[in-house]
Image: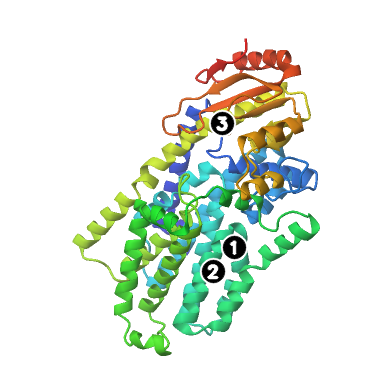
Amino acid sequence: MSFFQNRNQLATLLFLLLATLIAYILLLVLTQGNFTYAISAPYIHMTIAKYFIMDGILSVDGETYSSATSAPLWMMLLSPFYKLLGAKLFVYFSAFLNLFFQVLTILLAFKIVERFTSQKLHYAYGILLILGTPFITLTLGGAEHSLQIFLIVWFIYYLIPYLQDKKRSSDKWKLLLLAPFIVFVRYEDIAFIVAVAMALAFYFREWRFSLLLIASSLIFVAIFAFWSSVILGIDPVPTSIIAKTTVNQLSFMEKFLANLRQPHIVVLLTLNFAIFIKTLRGIEGFSLALFGTKVSDSKKSILLILSTIFIMTLIAHLLFARLGWMFRYEAYLVTFGLLNIIIYQHLFPLQKKWFLAVLAFILLGLAKQIAYSPIYASFSAKKIYEQKIQTAKFVKEYYTASHLTTDNIGSIPYFSDVKVFDIHGLTNPEIITLKKKNIYTDKIKKELILKKNNEMIIAYSSRFKDEKIEGYTKIVDWRVTNRLHPSDSVVSLYSRDDKVDEYYKKIKLFSEKELPKNVEIIWSRR
């Protein structure tokens, strides 16, 4: 049946398009009509695509080989379109892809429910998936997470019929083919694949297929690691992953307990654990499974397995991965967890009073995703526009040197041809090594800056414990006021001492003519 003949699907997709449009109207109002992403990640991906296609180098600074993204599949998917669309149109492509994969995910979710429960999914559940994940916020963010969700839901789409009939070799091959793409889009997805493999091994004694599934999932990662280390001579693991792990000082258990307190995690874990218990009790003879009895292929058994996979994946994510930053890191878990709950409700409907209680529990737990995150993302885009886009415009129009010291490794190298020295260390192997050793101090940072001797430094003021930098003069601070996104509110612009007069005039001209009026200008030199 075409989705145009399914009113519930059509209503859900129309809601997605309308809600996304409204969010972009708010965003454009806040950014004075300028299309902007809510985070830096898409600009970093676009910069990598730019250098990869135009110069044949895997890089962000345009000179040093580095794998600065933990989503290599997303980068490779984007890259060819840089050449096809050109730099101006390519800016919009990440948002388009997010919306495209969200549409596919919704269509798959409707098919999964109808195929497994023989009932059509009501549009209210589809809207819950959209708002709870939250899809609109992911589109405003413009990163790879919508593709991640689509691939995992697609995997579940083939996993369910395989669980119903393990003699279907076609579904087995589809799972094996999808697994490497899932891990290659985000490395932490190996937890999901391992959870699937463990569930198959435990419940069905599918040891051989389980090991094959894990091995298959690592194929692209292994090839990329070989290419990175042997051919390019860089770290086999993306530098962005290494850089992020160096800043986490919490133990695994401390991190787990901190993450576990989040309301949406409490809701998803509680309800999926309830599904696990309810289906576990409903399977006749399950107590013998530990001693070799195979679990049956009933629908309760499949829900038991899906909830098991979700719980194991969630626990692994809470231990090793990140939460937050517009809920994008755990978005795939929200979709997966909600899908399990929706399937259970269709197979074993709750009494009205219990249904309303569970719905209220879900809405309260996901309140930030549903009501707050799109607004937060719009204001985050406003901040990106007032800081990172403005510094990129200044560099493009007024900066005459070929190299720049900065922590803005996304928009500055994308919108200009300037080569950047990344003081934050997301792409710089030397700085990442120093961070690993926990010796990347303010003093060493400034020594590296002095060694590079670039004409300007443009960075968040928070990057420096002491604003004084030998050989440089701070000319100005650009301060933004953003109550929803108050961190890193100040960008500092420094000039090398022999260029102070020149860049003071240029910064003053740009500040008066082009800088948004609500950006506060605090001069350090007049």
Q: Say whether disc 2 or disc 3 marks the residue closer to the N-terminus.
A: 2
Q: CA distance from mark 1 to mark 2?
A: 8 Å
- Vertical comparison of 89 with 330: above or below: above
Residue beneath label 1, please? 183
Check if mark 2's residue and mark 3's residue have beta carbons within 8 Å: no
For the point 34% across and 85% down, the residue is: 287
Give the amino acid type for the residue marked by disc 2 in the picture.
Ile
Q: In the structure shown, which secondary structural element does the residue marked by tag 2 occupy?
A: helix
Query: Which class describes the residues within 10 Å of circle 1: few (<14), some (14-19), or many (20+)?
Result: many
Q: CA distance from mark 3 to mark 1?
A: 38 Å
Q: Say whether disc 1 or disc 2 marks the residue closer to the N-terminus.
A: 1
Residue beneath label 2, please? 193
Query: Which class describes the residues within 10 Å of circle 3: few (<14), some (14-19), or many (20+)?
Result: few
> Which x, y percent locates residue 100?
55, 51
Residue beneath label 3, please? 465
- Vertical comparison of 379 with 56: above or below: above
Give the amino acid type for the residue marked by disc 1 in the picture.
Val
- Vertical comparison of 440 with 460: above or below: below
Quadrant showing the C terminus? top right
Would residue 109 appear left or right of 50 to someone viewing this image? left
In this view, the mark in front (2 or 3):
3
For the point 75% across and 43% down, the residue is: 51
For the point 60% across and 13% down, the residue is: 512
Q: Quadrant of residue 124?
A: bottom left
Q: In the structure shown, which secondary structural element does the residue marked by tag 3 occupy?
A: loop
> Which x, y percent locates residue 72?
65, 55
Instruction: Decide which of 102, 265 is in the foreground and name it.
Output: 265
For the point 34% across and 52% down, the residue is: 263
Q: CA distance from mark 2 to mark 3?
A: 42 Å
